[in-house]
Image: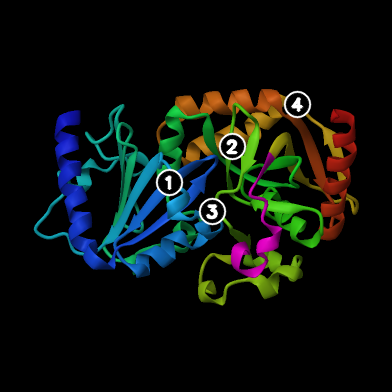
Amino acid sequence: MTDDRIELFLQEFKECYYKASGKEEQNISIRLGSEHAKLHFSNQHIAEKMSRSLAHLKAPSESVVLNTLSVFCFEGNLSPFSFPWTPADFEVQGLIKGMNTDRFQTIYQHGSGAIILFDQLRKEGFYYIDSATNIPYWEVSFPFRTLFHWWTRDTPYQLLHAGGIGDISSSMIITGKSGSGKSSTCLSSLLHQQLFLAGDDYVLIDTQKGILYSLYNCVKIEWGNLERLNFLKKLTDTKFKDADKAMIFVNERCSEKILTHSELHYSFIPVISREGKTKVIESNPAEALKSIAPTTLFQLPLIRTEAFGKCVALVKRLRTYQVMLGTDPGEIAETLYVFLNKDGLNRV
């Protein structure tokens, strides 16, 4: 399908949003790095679901001079409107045949049935689902992840499948595949008075300036790990007791522990160790790239050449270490805090 035909379809699709919203529309401005985005919701119900993890990024609308991204999020029956594709057009990762060009990106989200579209020229994104009750728990934890990723294409920003911890002057990303200890390492920062959490699953990085930004305030932990990390039990949201993972909305339970942004100096690769004490061992950029790029590129569809280039540029400017994880979460946090401060003295 040509860009002209996709553009015409998108104009009609946008009209569906306005018909679905009317007087119930909810608008929220958020910070994305040093930029701003305007989120438009067709009603309060879907707004509450899809903005909860972004609550710490909210900005007063009157203070926003320019929005570099607009997102339209809605639910409902679109009849008599119909999509110009059939299920036979759904490809790997939900890409829709004929609907992806240099200007437009489109996917069908298997499982929830959501349609996600983006216009690179207008910087407008769309998230549609037939009913907000069908939004899966993981989408609530990182809403608009795919749209934010597509938006970064022509910017120095990059979403990373990584966690982030630190303080206002220096920070580190925690990288690795699922099960590597990434989330538990990040969540150990909640135990330390002088360490703060930017995220445990996805963070936003300015790869040119080397700045870590928080993106989502919801963190997830395997239910089985709550026995070892029992300090998290009282923080979990009981509304998600049937989800595959326990959900914690940090902005609601301990907002003072959120690290909104910080200079980024380090990449840490967690390694589950059988030893009791936590140790930090120097590593190299190649190992950092192996722990960052594959999972990021696999989970975020399209824009992969640009994303890989940003990952390469990023690891070249960071110092990389392995952290051999001990058994005590408090001791893990203290080890990372001591490193951050001692090494910081060497950087000055």
Q: Nearer the viewer, residue 309 or 206?
A: 206
Query: Residue 199 at what x, y percent from top left?
Result: 63, 51
Earlier in the chain: of badge 4 and badge 2, it is 2
Question: What whole-number distance in Å separates the C-alpha atoms at marks 2 and 1?
Answer: 16 Å
Query: Residue 61 at what x, y percent from top left?
Result: 43, 54
The residue at which mark 2 appears reads as 205
Residue shown at 48%/58% (left/top)? 138
Q: Is residue 163 magenta?
A: no
Residue shown at 66%/27% (left/top)? 315
Question: Which picture quadrant has residue 317?
Answer: top right
Amino acid type indicated by mark 3: Leu
Res. 8 in view: yes
The residue at which mark 3 appears reads as 57
The residue at which mark 4 appears reads as 284
Q: Is residue 251 magenta?
A: yes
Q: Nearer the viewer, mark 3 or mark 4?
A: 3
Amino acid type indicated by mark 4: Asn
Asked which secondary structure carries label 3, the reply is: helix
Asked which secondary structure carries label 1, the reply is: strand
Asked which secondary structure carries label 2, the reply is: strand
Amino acid type indicated by mark 1: Ala
Instruction: Write the start and end of the magenta stretch as one range.
Output: 249-262
Amino acid type indicated by mark 2: Ile
